[in-house]
Image: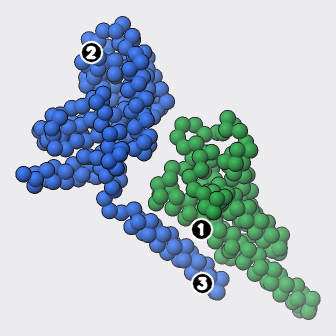
Amino acid sequence: MTQKNLFIGAAAALVVMFAGASMMYMSSKSGAPAAVPAASQAALVRAHAPTVGPADAPVTIVEFLDPACETCATFYPMVKELMAANPGKIRIVYRWAPFHNGSQDVVAMLEAARKQDKLWPALEALLASQAVWSPGHTPQSAAAFKQLEGLGLNREQMIADMAAPEIAQTIAQDLADAASLNVTMTPEFFVNGRPLPSFGWEQLTQLVNEALKATQKAP
Amino acid sequence: MPATDADRRAGLNRQATDSQAWTLVFVAWLIAGASTLGALFFGEVMRLPPCSLCWYQRIFMFPLAVILPFALFPFNRSVVQAALPLAGLGALVAAFHVLLVAGVIPERLEPCKAGVPCSETVIEWFGFVTIPLLSFAAFAAIAALLTFAYYRSSK
């Protein structure tokens, strides 16, 4: 009997220790995460980054996006709807975070389409057909290129632009900024310079709503 | 046939050694339980992503926490025997991981793909205690305790 009691006591002690340590860890981490320090704010928004929405919008969302990331594809239309629901109030800045092996070529493709003013249709086409050109999370640029066929892009110009040094520079800068901002997963959102407390759609909308409210109070 | 004194003494001896073996298995279970909850703490509470070698160690550690109680109530030598290969294989994977982190095994042999490199050190206490080292210590202790318990207990 004492053996049984010893076992039950030890099991309970382990569980209590785990729960206690978890709560201590959570409470030490809780509270709104600090805004990105001023020194790093420049890394959030760069002049070269593709942007939607008015420049003087009270709320700026910065999204680090990987065209091969499934959750990014899921969030894309949701963010679009969120912007449509608050017309003129939200500006979104996209930064590239091609973390998947081979994603960089696809980002170069998007930047080349951007030179022909077709970034958004190209991005939407690629996000919608992600399963086709990125089976099993392995982006294949040839298959991705095929998805852009119907958009009226100049093919030769695209191929030439994809190798352009300024596009490589953009990607390198975005990846460097992602690293300096501790972005390790996509999509990663910053709302007016604040990271999400934890990842999720509710957390994003809550942060956006708070930011919208804060700007309404100000005269 | 009435029990002789020798028989009775042998019986008492058996009880004594089995109770020692029970304690050894109990301590092994405590280590396995603490390691399992520790791994869950790193992964689910601190949100440190486990690398692929960490996953193999979890595969050998988590079942130990679950099956060792079946070796305790009632004391069952066969369950100790079944748990031994888990502890042994886990110790091997952990040893490989420790050597990888220490740089003894070159990086190119590393079985990790994209994601978290196994050679990355996320925690270092007192300058030398890393997660793979904790894992190896736990597996080695469990394997030693179970081996003793197996040979100490009566058939």
B84 to B98, vertically: above or below:
below
**Residue A195 in view of the camera:** no
Q: Residue at x 55, y 73 (%)?
A: A14
In this picture the colour scheme is by chain
Residue denoted by label 1: B34
Residue B9's image quarter?
A: bottom right
Q: CA distance from mark 1 to mark 3?
A: 18 Å
Which chain hosts label 3?
A
Q: Amino acid at mark 1?
A: Ala
Q: Report which residue position mark 2 lands on.
A: A116
Which of discs 1 and 3 lies nearer the camera? The answer is 1
For chain A, give the colour.
Answer: blue
Q: CA distance from mark 1 to mark 2?
A: 59 Å
Q: In the image, what residue type sits under mark 2?
A: Gln
Q: Secondary structure at mark 1?
A: helix
Q: Is residue B131 left or right of residue A104?
A: right
Say what amino acid the circle numbered 3 marks.
Asn
A132 and A84: which is toward the camera: A84
Tell me the residue that label 3 is attached to: A5
What's the mark number on residue B20? none
- Chain letter, colour green in render: B
